[in-house]
Amino acid sequence: MTEEHRRPRQLLEYGRRPLWKFAHVFFGVVMAWAVIFATLYLGVISSFESDKLAWWAIPLTLLAIGVCMALAWWLRGRQPGFSAGIWIGTGIGLIHAGLCYGPAM
């Protein structure tokens, strides 16, 4: 046998633990969506008795979205999976906010 046959196989790019990386992405999605949903929930519940949406609901939701985007940008080099999850969760949160705030306006 040659030397090439005795070498251990090289690991693929995703490393030894693809499930662990999926967990990082999934946790980022859930975390970003939960932060945006919390502000969305506060805004909608505060306007539950009246016909108008609270004036601070949309700026508060935009602030939460900005915080999530800044966190994703800051973590992109050190934890790319978590950063990608935050971007995905922010997109899902934006869709959710649009569906909830659209009829309330």
Image (cartoon, rainbow, N blue to C red):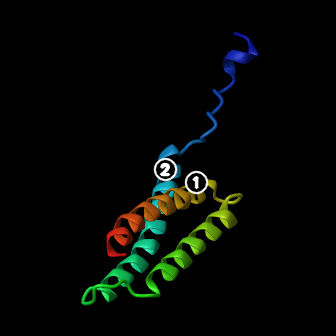
Residue at the extreme top of the image, as rendered:
1
Q: Residue at x 73, y 11 (%)?
A: 2
Q: For the N terminus, give its image quadrant.
A: top right
On the image, the x and y values in percent for residue 91 come to 49, 59
* Above or below for 55 versus 86: below
Hey, what amino acid is under mark 1?
Answer: Gly
Q: Tell me where residue 60 appears, x and y as whole percent.
A: 50, 82
Badge 2 amino acid: Phe
Mark carried by residue 22 = 2
Q: Is residue 27 above or below residue 54?
A: above
When the figure is inspected, residue 16 is found, relative to residue 90, above or below; the finding is: above
Q: Residue at x 43, y 79 (%)?
A: 39
Q: Quadrant of residue 12?
A: top right
Disc 2 crowd, CA 10 A, few/some/many (<14, 14-19, 20+): some
Res. 81 mark = 1
- Residue shown at the point (75%, 17%) measured from the top left: 3
| Separation of residues labelled 2 and 1 (CA atoms) | 8 Å
Q: Quadrant of residue 7?
A: top right
In the image: residue 37, left or right of residue 25: left
Q: Is residue 69 above or below residue 87?
A: below
Question: Secondary structure beneath disc 1?
Answer: helix
The quarter of the picture where the C terminus appears is bottom left
Image coords of residue 89 (percent x, y): 48, 60
Q: Give the farthest residue toward the left.
A: 49
Q: Residues within 10 Å of mark 1 (few under 14, many from 20)?
A: many
Q: Secondary structure at mark 2?
A: helix
| Marks 2 and 1 in Cβ contact (< 8 Å) | yes
